[in-house]
Image: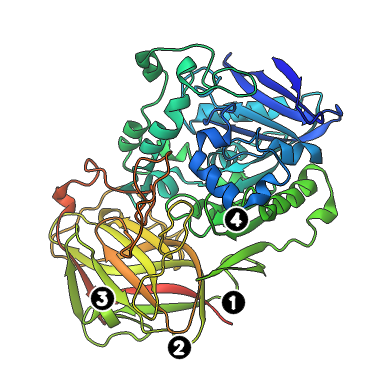
Amino acid sequence: MNASAAPTGDMIIEWDVPIATSDGLVLRADVFRPASQERCPVLLGLGPYAKGLPFQDGYPDQWNRLTSSHPEVLARSTGRYQNWEVPDPERWVPDGYVCVRVDARGTGRSPGFLDPFSPREIRDLYEAIEWAGGQPWSTGRVGLSGISYMAINAWLVAGLGPPHLAAIVAWEGAADWYRDMTHHGGILCTFWENWYDKQVLPVQYGMGDRSPVNPHTGDHVAGPVTLSDPVRAANRSDLGAVIRSHPLDDEYHRGRSASWTNVRVPLLSAANWGGIGLHSRGNFEAFTQAALPDRWLEVHGYEHWTEYYTDYGIDLQRRFLARFLKGAGGAWSDEPRVRLQVRRIDGFQERSESAWPLPRTVWTTWHLDARNPEQGLSPIAPAVNATVEYEPTGDGVTFLAPPAEEETEVTGPLAATLFISSTRRDADLFVALRLFGPGGDEVAFQGALDPHTPLSQGWLRASHRKLDPRRSVPYRPYHTHDQAQLLEPARVYELAIEMWPTSIVIPAGYRLAFTVRGRDYEYAGPMDQVRLTTFKNAFRGSGPFLHDDPRDRPADPFGGRVTVWTGPDHPSRLLLPVIPS
């Protein structure tokens, strides 16, 4: 253990502090605490990104965008101790918190078998929380705070009920390993295998002198030893292969998903409207499903990493943590249960609400009409039956609404009901809610990662159409994903498709559109090839959340022509949450 004072003189930093686990492994943690030696509440995070790797070195594209667009991030911090997706010690230690960062088993400077989100890793997090709660510099009250990975495993460990866990700030997480993360609508998402290769394996324990150097200690961030490629491969889960081997929702997935009935710790759940594919559904589920009444929902926009570090996000977190880690009741007493950054085409407008979905929602059905898709989205049900067919590799079919007569807000969860048939035994459906301007150009929005996202997306493998009636509601169908019910070619089937929550104030003259297709959404307007160095693919509208693995989607049975049926006999429709003025 190497303890040293930070250059500012008000912070003690201890590098590679050992945390012994119940199976004898030793994890390594960095501890940032006030130089006053006072007992303080703890902000802890355990993740796979190497605790000694500075944000600006490991994620330079994200860092440059954050600091150039929001210079306030560096107004109160040098950024030198900042890491990816966890609190900045220079912002939190002066406020009377201890920041603890733990390298997950098998990553950074913690040895062991690497298996993300596994029950063993969550047990490690439980034990790290209890270790931190018992340290002489701790008040015994531990909070989990962080983005994405740190939010996901926070919900998982909360289900185990660690006694010292007192609060959670879950910023843009996910909660259901099957529905939120690995199989959207039953269709395999390739994100996790690519993420593993690009962001985790370069800092797997044993990369040693092949890994970056912590600029503060001079040590390599991925361990004191350099192991061979075969040895490291044997020390980790083959994440992509394991996910592919579980195409249905089974015990493997449930063991890596939040158990909401057991989540009883005060919770601030922060979602991103543009987090389609990973970073929104779980945050809404957390707010509506967690057991404890002390839970709040915040929803924002901009990039995935932005608002956690801005003054807006820091203020929100600081008041919440002051209440539940320090007992400062007045800090959070007037906070609305729901805080929304309502999305407009030119920015956001903050608004307080009492519940989610919004109690005054007017659930509005818009019908599809295949006779003329360019005018085929309407609140009036068509009187005539019709069909339209598309090829699964093409652009599908888009149903356009008439121009809005007045400004109209759509905010909340939404769902589609489609009657379809296929020429083959299965079909993958990709649906998107879009917005078009008066001139006919599509309006794209900055997503959590991709700058050209639609308003919402949904997915469903037709053979996974079976619903759980106990958990389904009209605006959020819930599929069991426990069996594949293949199609009879040419037979018509009714499919209920969950779409992820959205918010948009539609200006007068703008048009909503609903697209059905057989592949991932792509923005059709002019755009640059957007890339981040930490992802494999260029972003074209769906970011890195793609469903293009041919092993999951072979031409047989997924290459058939699909027909959408509309009209009185087959009322294909879209349920929208319209908010009165």
- What is the crowding at mark 2: few (fewer than 14 residues within 10 Å), some, or many (at least 20)? few
Q: Secondary structure at mark 2?
A: loop
Q: Residue at x 73, y 44 (%)?
A: 76
Q: Position of residue 114 (x, y in %)?
A: 46, 24
Label 3 sits on a secondary structure element that is loop
Tell me whether circle 3 and circle 2 mark residues in contact (CB < 8 Å): no
Above or below — where is 292 with respect to 337? above
- Type of amino acid at the residue the image marks with label 2: Glu
- Find the distance from the CA under tag 4 to the CA under tag 2: 34 Å
Q: As shown in the figure, which amino acid type bears the numbered disc 1?
A: Arg
- Name which of mark 3 and mark 4 comes first in the sequence: 4
Please tell me which residue lies in front, 516 or 573: 516
SS under mark 4: helix
Which residue appears at 47% of the width and 84% of the height?
508
Query: Mark number for residue 570?
Result: 3
Q: CA distance from mark 3 to mark 1?
A: 29 Å
Name the colour scheme. rainbow
Q: Earlier in the sequence, mark 4 or mark 1?
A: 4
Q: Earlier in the sequence, mark 3 or mark 2?
A: 2
**First in sequence: mark 3 vs mark 1:** 1
Which residue matches tag 2? 405
Left or right position of 572 against 20: left
Q: Which mark is residue 287?
A: 4
Q: Is residue 423 left or right of residue 181?
A: left
Residue underneath mark 1: 360
Who comes first in sequence, dot 4 or dot 2? 4
Frontmost of labels 4 and 2 is: 2
